[in-house]
Amino acid sequence: MNPDKITYSEFLELDKNSEQLMEFIDGDVYLQASPSTVHQRISRKLTTIFDLYFSGKTCEPFVAPFDIILPVKTTDKNKVIPDLSVICDKFGLNENNYIGVPTLIIEILSPSTAWIDISKKFHLYQTNGVKEYWIISPKNNDIQIFNLDENGFYGEPSTFYGDSIAVSTVFEGLKVYLKDLFIA
């Protein structure tokens, strides 16, 4: 084991004694910064869209900060705090977090954590079988949607920008009008 990495058990000790939001990915700890105003606006608008879409349905959206403990498909458990996740398997829900694999995860890029969302989390979500992964870039005003293929890999993303409409392939009828999402 890499001496710079810690175990999930060591992370839990660190996490319970901290007031800082932390993620744990493959033995590394990542601190979460407070989101920007633009990030908050996008998150709020998405939450409204998702609340309306999933009202009365089996699946349920959850907004950050909400801990997702991904199962062991790597060497150790991982804890992430996605901006928005959709959970269809309620068996892993408990009072404090969700232990399992969300069907859909959305990350809104921030300058300080974009590389984690694009590389570390991309690989983690793909490895654990998250069916649909949306990466939203406030800087570029676009949404990239990655879907797992039959071999368990994310292929080329569907990219939406300008006046287009981002459409989920996992949830029929779930769509986001980009012109509404990126306008203040």
Image (cartoon, grey):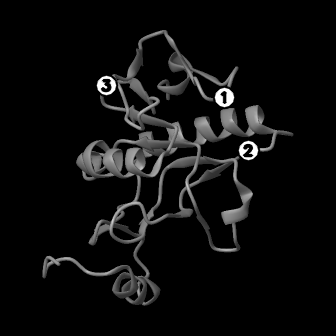
Measured Cα–Cα span from mark 3 to mark 2:
30 Å
SS at badge 2 = loop
Q: Amino acid at mark 3?
A: Asn
Instruction: Determine the residue located farthest toward the front in the rendered image.
Output: 151
Q: Amino acid at mark 1?
A: Phe
Residue that mark 3 sits on: 140
Q: Looking at the picture, does residue 70 appear above or below residue 103? A: below
SS at badge 3 = loop
Are discs 2 and 1 less than 8 Å apart at CB? yes
Could you say which is closer to the camera, residue 184 or residue 11?
Answer: 11
Q: Position of residue 13 (x, y in %)?
A: 40, 90
Q: Residue at x 76, y 34 (%)?
A: 52
Q: Looking at the picture, does residue 140 appear above or below residue 133? A: above
Q: Looking at the picture, does residue 37 appear above or below residue 50? A: below
Quadrant that contains the N terminus: bottom left
Q: Position of residue 74 (x, y in %)?
A: 35, 62
Residue that mark 2 sits on: 59
SS at badge 1 = loop
The image's mark for residue 171 is 1
Q: Residue at x 49, y 64 (%)?
A: 71
Structural crowding at the residue carrying mark 1, measured as other residues with C-alpha within 10 Å and reported as few (<14), some (14–19) or many (≥20): some
Question: Would residue 179 appear left or right of 30 to someone viewing this image?
Answer: right
Structural crowding at the residue carrying mark 2, measured as other residues with C-alpha within 10 Å and reported as few (<14), some (14–19) or many (≥20): some
Question: Would residue 59 appear left or right of 44 to someone viewing this image?
Answer: right
